[in-house]
Image (tube, rainbow, N blue to C red):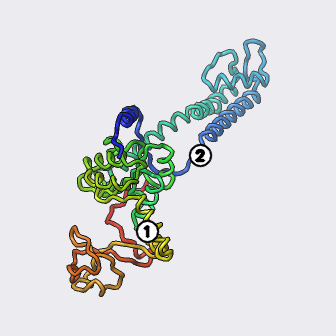
Amino acid sequence: MKLPGQDLIARRADERLATHQVKLPRRAVERPIRQVAKRLAMALFVLVVTALIVYADHEGYNDNSDDGVDLLDAFYYATVTLSTTGYGDITPVSDAARFTNIFVITPLRVLFLIILVGTTLEVLTERTREEWRQNRWRTALRDHTVVVGFGTKGRSAIQTVCAQGLKKEQVVVVDPSSKVVDAATADGYAGVVGDATRSDVLLRAEAQRARQIIIATQRDDTAVLAVLTARQLNRSAKIVVAVREEENAPLLKQSGADMVITSASAAGRLLGLSVLSPAAGMVMEDLIQQGSGLDIVERPVIKAEVGRGVRETDDLVVSVVRGHRVLGYDDPSVGELQLTDRLITIVRATPSTRVAPDMRPLPQD
């Protein structure tokens, strides 16, 4: 394995200067160009209406240059009035014109100013609202799942846990690419832009309060640093990591990973099994695809099953989880099932077979 060297140190030093963003799922909004175009059209409409009102009562206005107000003068007056410039060369002199300025032109001037500054107000409002959403999200986030890397492996891992009943609001994606995080938020997940090997990035994802952390990075050395950082922040979380090279698995376990999946060797074994027995390969592929066909689920032992043998249950039991041990279905030490045991079974995928950890849902915006 290539150890982190000067290139990695330099890259991390450069990333310290970058701003790490937290992005939450949001509803689709109108494109900014279209919003600006609408505001410009509204401002032009107010200007034209004001000019026509002035021109309709042009006899009540006085122009210091030629004592007459034509259509051009009306637009000129409307422009300097709505923009609060007010040169004073054209003034209302009749009672009707002054009455119109008080009750019509002045409200239009206020409306015109609101349209002009509306974009700035909207930006400030959106920033305040987004900050409020993030504070509310961060306060309510507990026992969630942090996924480092939203590539093929990370996306498949999220789909699998969500197929077992995990809510999207309980998933936080961490990735250094802003475009990748945007894709994650578009799918309904919260995202943090940044390098997961840095503690401040994982703190933004509230990794210190996460129940489980999935690390699916592109490089094994990055995975090692991410595991070390995550374990330092959270001693009790379940950390599952994927690596490319099998020789790096022991290093990751020493770094604090609870489970290490070697993606290259796992794919190779599935390929070999498919060559020897295409049907067995199809069954294995069906088992690892949650939500369709056959699924592998872990569930607790119910009271009616306590004291029975493994083969006396209604489900097809593969293994029994007792304490920190995983016992095969044919292990003589299993004996009778206990209430504290958990069963790993193969079941037909239906909505009722979903078994997920007890997680507190987050408030919706």
Image quadrant assignment for residue 105: top right
Which disc number belongs to residue 30? 2
User: Which sits earlier in the primary sequence, circle 2 or circle 1?
Assistant: 2
> Relative to 97, is 13 on the left or the right?
left
Q: Disc 2 marks which amino acid?
A: Glu
SS of the residue under disc 2: loop
Q: Is residue 274 above or below residue 18?
A: below
Image quadrant assignment for residue 199: top left
Residue 291: tell me if it is visible.
Answer: no
Closest to the observer, 278 or 357: 278
In contact (CB < 8 Å): disc 2 and disc 1: no
Closest to the observer, 75 or 228: 228
Q: Position of residue 352 (x, y in %)?
A: 41, 76
Observer-side mark, 2 or 1, equals 1
SS of the residue under disc 1: helix
Q: Position of residue 307 (x, y in %)?
A: 21, 85
Q: Is residue 174 above or below residue 120?
A: below
Closest to the observer, 65 or 240: 240
Pointer 1 local density, CA inside 10 Å: few below 14, some 14–19, many at least 20 = some
Which residue corresponds to mark 1?
Answer: 288
Which disc number belongs to residue 239? none
Q: Is residue 35 above or below residue 284?
A: above
Residue 65: tell me if it is visible.
Answer: yes
The number of numbered badges drawn on the structure is 2
Closest to the observer, 260 or 323: 260
Q: Disc 1 marks which amino acid?
A: Ile
Name the residue: 51% across, 74% down. Answer: 278
Q: CA distance from mark 2 to mark 1?
A: 40 Å
